[in-house]
Image (cartoon, rainbow, N blue to C red):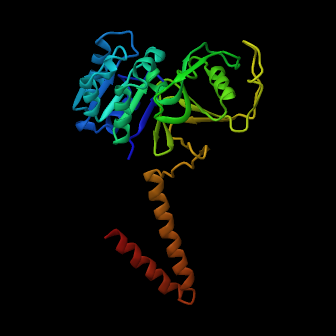
Amino acid sequence: MSGPLFVIGGAEDKLRRPTVLREFVEAAGGEHARIAVVPTASSLGPEIVEVYGAVFAKLGALDVFGVRPEDRAQAGDPALVAQIDAATGVFMTGGNQLKLSGVVSGTPFGEAIWRAHRRGAVVGGTSAGASIQSSHMVAFGPGGSTPKQRMTQVAAGLGLLEGCVVDQHFEQRNRYGRLLMIVAQSPHLLGIGVDEDTAAVVHEGTLRVTGRGAVTILDPSAIVTNAHEARRNAPLLASGVQLHVLPAGSTFDLAERRLLPAAGTTDPREAAELGAANRDLRRLARDIAAGDVSPTTLRRRRARRGAAEHD
């Protein structure tokens, strides 16, 4: 069974309330987790691995190690591939997503990440490491609310999340327009925008939201658009796109493209009150059924029940 995917919108909390990263470590095996940090997209040196190593160790991971191919030749190195094969979790950092795609996609290293996912390991990534998980990946482009022709470009992702395109830092950098442009040009794709310190956790066709922000889904199945004829930089017509804004706790069926009902939860205090109310109702029903009993006998029965309950 394939493992879960953690698609993180960037700037995840690492110190005060590391909700997203804690869930990632737990999914990778908790105290048995062996996490490979892939910092290929980052412009930082070994310190980026040290940061995540310290965070994951604090959250209980057994072992954290960096695996950093810098070009496609290194992405074919059997030693680096073996490290991914030994991991229970793979975490791709933020940075330049076009570099990450150019180095990893279509290489033995990328295939090792695929194998990890297929054998049940958790694969996650933040910012650039989130975008590359989808079949189509935002390469670059400005923010803005209005979709415009040629606003952004798309590159090939790893395809772990099929039929989707992922954008990150979504609300914080106002990336509605560029995600709308992509789905207007490719209406078979589901657009997924992930806010900062938020993750879309995808497992067995279901997307669940965790973290501080929201996940925005654009479903262009019924879109009416002029993307095929709009001129360069012109605003695009995009009518009929179905919008889903999903806060933490929401779940979404990616195949059916629909919101799933929220799981029922009951406060323990409410449960106790409901139990007491049900007991009172049962007593009332018995009392009504005993309508032919004299009032004196009925009072005695009630007194005996009360005494028994206090023993």
Q: Is residue 58 visible?
A: no
Q: Is residue 93 visible?
A: yes
Q: Residue at x 54, y 75 (%)?
A: 284
- How many numbered marks are there? 0
From this view, report whether residue 271 is shown above or below residue 130: below
Q: Is residue 191 left or right of residue 125?
A: right
Name the image quarter holding the C terminus. Answer: bottom left
Give the camera-side residue of 135 and 199.
135
Spot occupied by residue 287 in the image (x, y as percentages of width and height): 53, 80
Q: Residue at x 61, y 16 (%)?
A: 152
Spot occupied by residue 257 in the image (x, y as percentages of width and height): 61, 43
Spot occupied by residue 129 in the image (x, y as percentages of width and height): 43, 23
Spot occupied by residue 77 in the image (x, y as percentages of width and height): 28, 22
Which quadrant would residue 32 be assigned to in this image?
top left
Q: Residue at x 26, y 25 (%)?
A: 78
Q: Residue at x 37, y 41 (%)?
A: 118
From this view, report whether residue 288 is shown above or below residue 199: below
Give the camera-side residue of 49 and 70.
70
Give the camera-side residue of 209 and 68.
68
From this view, report whether residue 148 is shown above or below residue 113: above
Q: Is residue 237 left or right of residue 49?
A: right
